[in-house]
Amino acid sequence: SMFRLDGRLALVTGASSGLGRHFALTLARAGARVAVAARREEALQALVQEIEAAGGRALALPLDVADAARVRACFDRLGAEAGVADILVNNAGITVTKPLLHQTEADWDHVMDTNLKGAWLVATEAARRLVDSGRPGSLINIASILAERVAGGVAPYAISKAGLVQATKAMALELARHGIRVNALLPGYIVTDLNREFLRSEAGDKLRARIPSRRFGEMEDLDGPLLLLASDAGRAISGATLTVDSAHS
Ligand code: NDP
């Protein structure tokens, strides 16, 4: 089907846990070879084994997205060992949850260096390698519903994700003539290491009470949207923001 990814090479950042880990498994099931990148290499090795045990092909790459030299080194290694990534799932991200006036300069820098500068470095490097090789590609930035609305306690995070949406649109515009599509996926709340503490707190209970379904989402909710953007099924979709939150908030 047009959603299959056989013969494609995908790079997933932040694949050592949560959504990134799930995205890597989904892409591998759809037939892609998958390079999984993050700082925690043991978790990546375990994921590679899981994908290969299921008949897929995978490769672990150490990566700190906030460091341009490490980003380049990661793509160099990917190039040497597997080739140019046709698909990027730009997923690495963090949050610092505390009231606005308690957010420090270090908190701001940590969130921005990872979610905005890091995502920018990875996406532009992926695009550079595609342009140099003359190949088409699909870049998928993992933003958040908080790119478009705010919630208490996560101001720098929401600002970083809003910036990532603008980066998505700017890249889509300039890369279209190279056959490179760039889109953003905006998931609603899904319980992972990122937010487990917050979603299980009193604030999380209040949040859930405002969600029409009274449930947080599941990682599987993102499978169809991810494959749409990654595959030929989405061949005319670029510069789009796809919200996946079951009308949550
Ligand atoms: P997790 O905390 O489970 O995963 C975050 C991943 O990012 C980890 O694999 C971590 O790996 C990686 N990471 C963090 N910093 C860096 C870095 N400097 N360099 C490389 N990798 C890094 O969170 P989620 O799975 O929930 O989040 C994944 C993405 O989805 C994030 O961008 C998040 O903002 C977004 N998102 C999540 C939602 C949710 O409800 N869960 C909703 C909307 C968006 P390591 O520590 O090994 O480097």
Image (cartoon, rainbow, N blue to C red):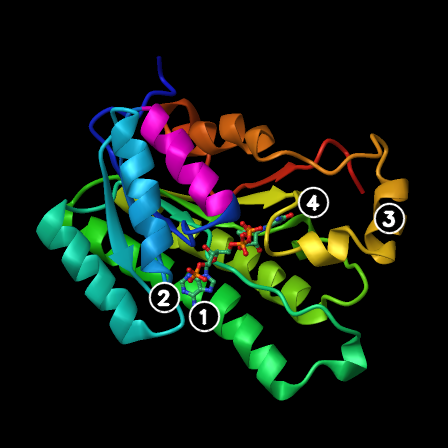
Q: CA distance from mark 4 to mark 2?
A: 26 Å
Q: Which residue is disc 2 drawn over?
A: 121
Residue farthest top in this picture:
1
Apparent side of residue 172 relative to residue 157 in the rendered image (left or right)? left
C-beta proximity under 8 Å, tags 3 and 4: no
Residue at (87% x, 55% y) in the render: 202
The kind of residue on which mark 3 rests is Asp
Callout in the foreground (4, 2): 4
Residue at (79% x, 59% y) in the render: 151
Earlier in the chain: of badge 3 and badge 4, it is 4
Q: Which residue is disc 1 drawn over?
A: 117
Earlier in the chain: of badge 3 and badge 2, it is 2
C-beta proximity under 8 Å, tags 1 and 4: no
Earlier in the chain: of badge 1 and badge 4, it is 1
C-beta proximity under 8 Å, tags 3 and 2: no
**From which residue to which does the magenta span run?**
19-30
Callout in the foreground (3, 2): 3
Please provide percent x and percent y for residue 150: 77, 59
Q: SS of the residue at dot 2? A: helix
Please provide percent x and percent y for residue 104: 67, 85
- Asked if disc 4 is less than 8 Å from ligand 1, the answer is yes
Q: CA distance from mark 1 to mark 2?
A: 6 Å
Q: Which residue is disc 4 drawn over?
A: 189
Label 1: few (<14), some or many (≥20) within 10 Å?
many
C-beta proximity under 8 Å, tags 1 and 2: yes
Please provide percent x and percent y for residue 229: 44, 33
Does residue 22 appear in the picture of this structure?
yes
- Asked if disc 2 is less than 8 Å from ligand 1, the answer is no
Q: Which residue is disc 3 drawn over?
A: 205
Residue in front for this viewpoint, 150 or 111? 111
In magenta segment, residue 124: no
